[in-house]
Image (cartoon, rainbow, N blue to C red):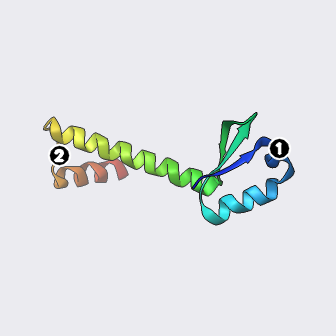
Amino acid sequence: MPTIRPSADLRNNYNEISAFCHQYSEPVFITKNGKGDLAVMSIEEYERLCGKFELYNLLNEGLKAERNGELKSFDSVVSDLKKGLE
């Protein structure tokens, strides 16, 4: 169940909200005038989430390339990587 707090809590209970975000690795949803306004999360969780999005995008590109017959062999990829390191 999501954690929902009013905007005043962000100002008045910042340390408590921060500790919660770090301990449970989930966002706290902040409301303003009774409506959803913000999602607050730890930097670590934000970076993990962004990493997942990046991975999903790369996997999606690979699936798209496979559907379009644009795949490279493993040896070709390794060769290209080695050239890039030189």
Rendered location of residue 61, percent (x, y)? 29, 40
- Could you tell me the amino acid type at mark 2? Lys
For the residue pair 31 and 41, the one nearer the viewer reads as 31
Residue farthest toward the front in the current orientation of the protein = 34
Residue farthest toward the bottom in the current orientation of the protein = 23
- For residue 72, which numbered disc appears in the image? 2
Label 1: which secondary element: helix
Assign the N terminus to one quadrant of the image.
bottom right
Q: Residues within 10 Å of mark 1 (few under 14, many from 20)?
A: few
Corner quadrant of residue 8: top right
- Could you tell me the amino acid type at mark 1? Ala
Corner quadrant of residue 21: bottom right
Q: Is residue 74 left or right of residue 28?
A: left
Residue 2 seen in this snapshot: yes
Q: Is residue 17 left or right of residue 51?
A: right
Q: Is residue 59 left or right of residue 54?
A: left
Q: Look at 29% across and 54% down and name the residue there.
A: 82
Q: Look at 15% across and 35% down and name the residue there.
A: 68
Rendered location of residue 77, percent (x, y)? 23, 50
Q: CA distance from mark 2 to mark 1?
A: 55 Å
Rendered location of residue 35, percent (x, y)? 68, 35
- What residue is disc 1 on? 8
Disc 2 or 1, which lies upstream in sequence?
1
Q: How many marks?
A: 2
Residue 86 seen in this snapshot: no
Label 2: which secondary element: loop
- For residue 77, which numbered disc appears in the image? none
Q: Look at 18% across and 54% down and name the residue there.
A: 74
